[in-house]
Image (tube, helix red, strand yellow):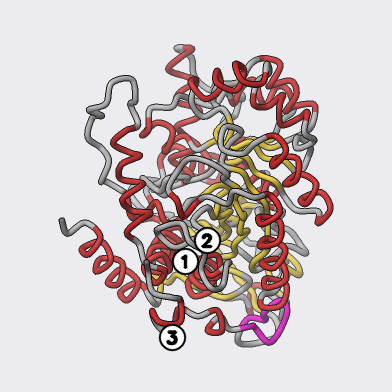
Amino acid sequence: MEKSPRAQTKSATAASIPAPAVKPAAPAGPRELGWLPDSVYTGEKFEAGMAFFADAHGRIARFSREPKDLAIARRLPGQAALPGFVNGHSHAWHRAIRGRAEARSRVANEPLATWHEALTRTAGGLTGEEIFDTARMAFLEMLASGITCVGEFHDLHHQPDGSPWPEPNFLAQEILRAAHDVGIRIALFQVANAMGGPPRTVIASADQFVRDTEVLRGFLEKNFPADEAWLGVGASGVGAVPPDFLKAISTYAHTQKLRLHVQVSERAIDHEACIAAHGRTPIALLAERGLVDKRFTAVNAIHLSDDDVKLLGAARAVVCACPTSARNLGLGATPVEKLLAAGATLALGSDTQVQIDLLEDARLLEYALRTGRAQRAVLAPDSATPLFHAATFAGARSLGATGGALDVGRPADFFTVNLFDPSIAGAEPGALLNNLVFSLERRAIREVWIGGRQLVVNGRHAQQGAIVGRFVDSQRRLWAS
């Protein structure tokens, strides 16, 4: 059995999570901060000669072209400013598996056997402190790619043998501590899994799940500003959570007005097993239990019937596609064209962390459609706009976040790109969004700001060396034999 939280390290205790003195936290420096990039994306186009300003709480207060305002704003020469990306679905601890499960499966009729072996080994081998280090590594990489908010699908609850921690929400607190340390906003989804998977992911009782989740909700409200860290509820799939358990989750989420995310119809075999067991598709089963509404997000949702698509659209639900992860695992492609036509909202997620780049995810969606249709610009006449929307505002809606756009009243969460980076050099304002969505290399991201605080300078986080070093040490120990 792993050591108790207190025995591992002082830094691993819940008490080490600092409670910011101001809610929300105010940026350091003057009462009002302003920025003047060469151009700023306002949601419809890039505009030059425009400064934007944040108040003492890190929220955008105004945009201005007045000469006196342009004179006092901080110049960001050679850069364009865009709203921070929102990562709708993340398993931070999966960052430890990257590159460890790429061999072909030796098990007949189970193409994911190699992946599940690596997953089980990692889940059983990571200490609480190493889960913190791995989460910091994933969140650092997200920030460096322009992601300012993440929806973390927290499913690693117990000690490796499945026994509870003295503090049941210890690992959730470690994930929160990692996000706070790096500086990224986080929607922490407490995930239900009643059967299957590594022992430390299983919470067999719906009553226990609700009790632990309610305690975690109180912890979050006490220790974090509401827009820095907040709670959501999730389920790892209809095959892993019995119908009555799903109903209890739905009731709790609706009572507390929490976002609800479910991994659903990721593999054809799981989709078909649900139909065989319940006489209906996973989406239909979730709708029957009252889960599918405008606060609901279906994660991956690859194998959908036409009726499923209509149901999600009619509910104005969100679908979070994770195309890089799905492509890596050989799962298939989310039917995004049908979903958008039906009225559903499309968000994006990094899921297994095989690569953390939401623009790559965005372009993969369009390219899959182009390959299948032998046409161009399939998703929309101007595909770049809805794809960028999926990586920003739609993700914020899925998580219940306040960011996702540079608007007055929203937080000053943004990143800048080097307009002279070889991947986008020469793009005039009218072509810049297309260049960003379809061509930008991640090295072009220069600065990242969250709530008016600069966290990435010239592509580097202040703690990058220490975070990477600790993660490397953890990987060496985990994969030594």
Instruction: Please tell me whether the stretch drawn in magenta is mainly helix, strand or loop.
Output: loop
Q: Which mark is residue 447?
A: 1
Point out residue 373 in the picture as x, y percentages from the top left corner: 49, 12
Which sits in the foreground, 207 or 318?
Answer: 207
Which sits in the foreground, 216 or 81?
Answer: 216
Horizontally, residue 371 falls left or right of residue 433, namely left
Point out residue 358 in the picture as x, y percentages from the top left corner: 48, 45
Point out residue 58 in the picture as x, y percentages from the top left corner: 68, 74
Instruction: Determine which quarter of the picture holds residue 479.
Output: bottom left
Q: Which mark is residue 350?
A: none
Q: Is residue 20 magenta?
A: yes
Residue under the point 44% across and 63% down: 159
Residue on which disc 3 sits: 10
Disc 2 crowd, CA 10 A, few/some/many (<14, 14-19, 20+): many
Measure the C-alpha gap from mark 2 to mark 3: 34 Å
The secondary element bearing badge 3 is classed as helix
Mark 3 or mark 1, which has the lower sequence index?
A: 3
Point out residue 324 in the picture as x, y percentages from the top left corner: 42, 37
Q: Determine whether 209 is above or below 368 in the image.
A: below
Q: Determine whether 208 is above or below 428 in the image.
A: below
The span picked out in magenta is 19-27
Residue under the point 75% across and 53% down: 258
Q: Residue furthest top?
A: 374
The secondary element bearing badge 2 is classed as strand
Q: Determine whether 244 is above or below 420 in the image.
A: above
Residue on which disc 2 sits: 415
Measure the C-alpha gap from mark 2 to mark 1: 5 Å
Mark 2 or mark 1, which has the lower sequence index?
A: 2
Measure the C-alpha gap from mark 3 to mark 1: 32 Å
Q: Are marks 3 and 1 in contact (CB under 8 Å)?
A: no
Q: Residue furthest right?
A: 255
